[in-house]
Image: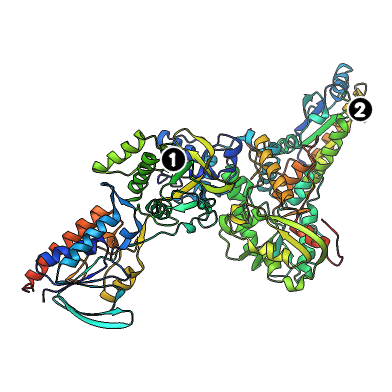
Amino acid sequence: MGKVLVVGGGIAGMQTSLDLAAMDHPVYLIEKEKNLGGNLRNLYRVFPTNEKAETVLAGYLEKIEAWNNITVYTNSTVFDFKGKAPAFKVTINTKGKRHKLSVGAIVLATGFSLYDPAEKKEYGYGRYKDVISAVDLEKMLKDGKLERPSDSKKPESIVSVQCVGFRDIRANEYCSSFCCMSALKNAVLIKKEHPEIEVTVMYMDIRTPSLYEQMYSDARNLGVRFIRSRPAEIFEKNNKLVLNFENTLTGKTRTMESDLVVLSIGAIPSSETEELGKMMGLTLSKTGFFKVVSAPLGTDVNGIFVAGANCGPKDTSYSLSQGSAAAAQVNKTLRDLNVKGG
Amino acid sequence: MPENGFEPRIVVFACNWCAYAGADLAGVSRIQYPPTTRIIRVMCSSRIDPTFILKAFLHGADGVLVAGCHLGDCHYIEGNYNTEKRMKKTTQALKHLGFETERFRLEWISASEGAKFAKVIAGFTDQIRELGPNPMGKVTEV
Amino acid sequence: MSKVDNCYQCGLCTGFCPKRRVSKYSPRLRINEFLLNKQKEASWECLTCGLCSQHCPQTVDYLSFVRELRAGSVDEEAIAHKSVFTLLCEIMNCYPEAKGVPVDFEGETDENSEIAYFPGCIDFFDCFLDIGVNFHEIGDSSIKLLNKIGIKPKLLSLRCCGHDALWQGHKEIFDELRRYNTEKIERSGVKTLVTSCAECFRTFSKDYELDIEVMHLSQILEKNTDKLNLETKNCKVTYHDPCRLGRHMEVYDAPRNVLQAVKGLTLKEFDETREDSQCCGVSAWVSCNTKAKVLMVEKLDSAIGTGAGVLITTCPKCYAHLNCLKNEKPPIKDFDIDVVDLAIFLSSMDGEAKKGD
């Protein structure tokens, strides 16, 4: 059977599905939410192109719709699994109804969950209305409402705090890789539209590899301020937010006021990762993401592959590239197992 | 402790205006007293910090004497009242430590009491001889 | 040497450091100087309060780092009261017939009890600290409270636990105190050591390797609040978490539970409380200077700000420092709050209802 199950309808899963379909593999694309799109639905614009996420998504949906051999199941999760390549038997659960699927290979593209910044109690997320997360900001920008949640006034100053809950042995040791770009992207967007708003980024290191460096230059050239520091705490005083920190480049400790504080948060393994891992016998790395056992995207089990942020935090471009890579690896594997397409 | 004729080493802190002058007078008057003392002149007995006493013993002094003006006669008016309070507390601390408090003395000796000075030293030396050498096993480095 | 290599210079520690509010002290910079310039000069401004390491995302153990730097070369100038308490430790160590600290207190004791009580150096504080409070009372009160909950403790006359010597960098003095005390405890046959001092508690628990159970007075009282039966009238108190009991040993609830078991007592919390509690200003007698005083004033002001009439603490040092500042002559200002040790406070309301506000 050349059929493939793709678990997860985010950008990686959608890309995999399209590539597989183009190679004559019928695809079952299952998605736990009501709609396809995954974390793309949380975004306003995607870097580095700054296209609107909803446009990108609409493009994918159109293409998926056009393929006859992609069957989409939304509100669906994997219920049961047995067999081995090229004969897996998977039961999926759609709102209580069970479907049995026979597939030759499986691609897990289950994406990521977001870190809950309320865990960093010192930063006051959930306690102070005007401390928001980067995802909250994306929604605000999408809705066209850049306002302080407390009084709906336009903020005169915005501070973005990087590495919240990451590069932190007390939370997540690893670096979530996309939050620098994400923060800079929004800083640039905000500065372009509201040059009078004071935008400051508090960072430990700015991670803008390869051609992404342009975004950093753009931000600086637009007057975004950068303070190298990890703030100790954030609290509220006289209707403004106050950050307590040491500027590590000047050595001065300061408090700084801001109308709005945006906490840059990143990716943690999605809740399905551990479940699916157990169900299918897949190793997780010590950070809880799926472990890639045979490059580029193979797991411990022959015929099961991963793609996208479920094997490590990554941005949209990288995720969709892995989507394609997974499709190629699936195709090769199935051909090696002498299964004809269709 | 057996007294096999050891020569006590006694540290004397003497205030400039009274006790030290008294010691001077004893010397000028050729009144003999045992050569066991090392006299340290301070401007006022209240300059003496309890740590001086403790350090003196730690460094091997067999006896320590603090000598100041009679109460009411302090050159700095109230200094020696502070000395009295402080030295009482120091004695208390030495007692807490199980240290022979007889090794530590506070005396009021005026500038004209040369003979008294000599007598005090002689008596104190005898007492220390009886008590024996400083029991502190280790002499700390200066 | 404690590993500080993984410090990535984020500055979070300095953002939290209380000394940094009143001076230029920066834990981050200090580590940087050590890593890059091999600068081994000891750090005497550090309170060793632990606020920095509590939050450090790289879990750098800054306290051990500071302690080890100090062990290289003790700066006598940085130690208050001319190191008199350290001298007492030296004497205890080198004087063969030296008794340990005095343990002559009121109350019922039992030579054969398996529970020992150790008061620490409080009687020596009475000798050398003239700040208008009585430290001996802590011992009397602690034993009275232990008696009340049905315990007749054995009084163990150990030498000073060595906390100050250790944190001042006097490694040899500490090692000898520890050796003597460990042997004495082992030979005594006791199974539990109760102390009324947060610093002794931390030191016996973490810096010694004892086989017995070490408890702070508040912990053993917490286990027996039903036997305490204390009552007062309209008394509002606030509680200061000493660094050594709080952040160092993570004991936050015991003293609070004991206080809240007193009828008629209301416990008000500082804004910065428990693991966020601000240090009283001095630790191990190191750097008791004007900068430390600013922190003490802040602490007292915050205490008054809670609306309480009494500030309770479970460490004789915090008790000493805050009262010293309060009773300074000439006075800095009038602090309308009493600073009292937990044992003295509880013992004073035994039997009688007390009015206090």
* Residue C149 in picture, x, y percent from top left: 76, 71
Residue A295 visible in the displayed image: no
* Residue C128 in picture, x, y percent from top left: 77, 42
Numbered badge on residue A200 = 1
- Image: C153 above or below B97: below
Residue at 24 percent of width and 82 percent of height: A99
Residue at 63 percent of width and 35 percent of height: C78
Colouring: rainbow
Residue C238 visible in the displayed image: yes
Disc 2: which residue: B116
Q: In which quarter of the image is residue C353?
A: bottom right
Pointer 1 indicates a residue of which chain?
A
Count all numbered tags in the image, as a single digit: 2
- Image: C149 above or below C200: below
Number of other residues with Cα within 10 Å of mark 2, as a class: few under 14, some 14 to 19, many 20 or more:
some
Q: Nearer the viewer, residue C304 or C277?
A: C304
Number of other residues with Cα within 10 Å of mark 1, as a class: few under 14, some 14 to 19, many 20 or more:
some
Q: Residue furthest front?
A: A144
Left or right of C91? Residue B36 is: right
